[in-house]
């Protein structure tokens, strides 16, 4: 019998503009951060590259400290770029992809805002031939009514709209992989928060 293999072979986690300045402006912002924390922990277990951006950091502030991006004891990123463009597909991120090597990738996106930066990033990645997963319990906007409209558009454009837990299990693909026990523990650790996040962000 062949050794178990992961279902997704070249995933990359995209974290879009989760900055301090937006904390009180975005609908259910703490829930988006919570889902992102779960995916960041999964990225460490499964060795998934992470790219992150800020939008005009000088005006809108740093990435939320609880994510620990680029902190000495936190999660290292392949790119943590500041941008004025709405899409994350900026030169620094493009270079990070080149550094990762050849091949199309499975890009999973969390962050804000659903109808602006998340949408434009998704469209650019699809145009480049990558598969894109948008995490419904990991994206939001200032106005919650924008979210389902954006997600419906991205489905029509070819993105996969799914949940964080569904994506984690699709990423693994097999309970026989060596990291499954750690991943199962992560799912249990976030079980309560996952229910809260789904209830808050996926009811529209």
Image: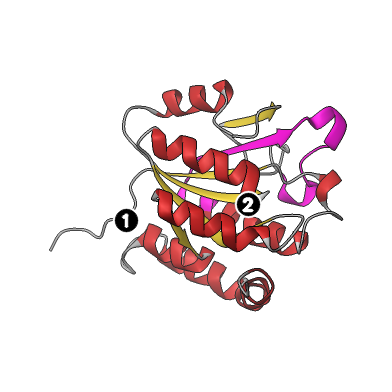
The reply to whether the magenta stretch includes residue 47 is yes
Q: Which residues are magenta?
A: 43-68
Residue at the left extreme of this rendering: 1
Q: Is residue 166 left or right of residue 177?
A: right
Q: At which x and y percent is residue 139?
A: 63, 56
Label 1, residues with CA under 10 Å away: few <14, some 14-19, many ≥20: some
Marks 2 and 1, the one that precedes in the sequence: 1
- What residue is shown at x 44% (from left), y 56% (from top)? 155
Between 181 and 26, the one lying in front of the other is 26
Label disc, if present, on residue 192 of the rendered structure: none
In the rendered image, which quarter contains the C terminus? bottom right
Asked whether disc 2 touches disc 1, contact meaning CB atoms under 8 Å apart, the reply is: no
In the rendered image, which quarter contains the N terminus? bottom left
What residue does disc 2 label?
Answer: 114
Q: At which x and y percent is residue 179?
A: 42, 60
Query: Could you tell me which secondary element the residue under label 2 belongs to?
Result: helix
Label disc, if present, on residue 6 of the rendered structure: 1
Residue 21 found in image quarter: top right
Of tags 2 and 1, the one toward the viewer is 2
- What residue is shown at x 71% (from left), y 49% (from top)? 67
- What residue is shown at x 50% (from left), y 54% (from top)? 153
Q: At which x and y percent is residue 144?
A: 71, 63
Between 182 and 167, the one lying in front of the other is 167
Instruction: Name the colour scheme.
Output: secondary structure
The reply to whether the magenta stretch includes residue 201 is no
Between 111 and 48, the one lying in front of the other is 111
Between 171 and 123, the one lying in front of the other is 123
Q: Is residue 56 left or right of residue 24?
A: left
Residue 39 found in image quarter: bottom right
């Amino acid at each position: 019998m062949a050794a178990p293999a992961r279902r997704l072979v070249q995933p990359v986690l995209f974290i879009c503009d989760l900055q301090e300045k937006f904390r009180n402006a975005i609908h259910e912002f703490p829930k988006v951060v919570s889902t992102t924390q779960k995916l960041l922990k999964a990225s460490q277990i499964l060795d998934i590259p992470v790219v992150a951006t800020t939008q005009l950091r000088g005006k809108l502030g740093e990435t939320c400290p609880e994510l620990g991006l680029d902190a000495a004891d936190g999660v290292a990123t392949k790119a943590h770029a500041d941008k004025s463009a709405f899409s994350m597909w900026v030169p620094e991120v493009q270079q990070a992809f080149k550094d990762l090597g050849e091949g199309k990738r499975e890009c999973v996106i969390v962050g804000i805002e659903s109808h602006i930066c998340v949408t434009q990033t998704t469209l650019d990645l699809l145009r480049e031939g990558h598969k894109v997963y948008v995490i419904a319990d990991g994206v939001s906007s200032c106005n919650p009514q924008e979210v389902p409209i954006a997600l419906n558009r991205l489905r029509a454009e070819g993105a996969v709209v799914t949940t964080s837990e569904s994506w984690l299990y699709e990423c693994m693909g097999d309970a026989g992989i060596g990291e499954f026990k750690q991943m199962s523990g992560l799912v249990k650790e976030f079980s309560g928060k996952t229910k809260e996040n789904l209830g808050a962000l996926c009811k529209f």
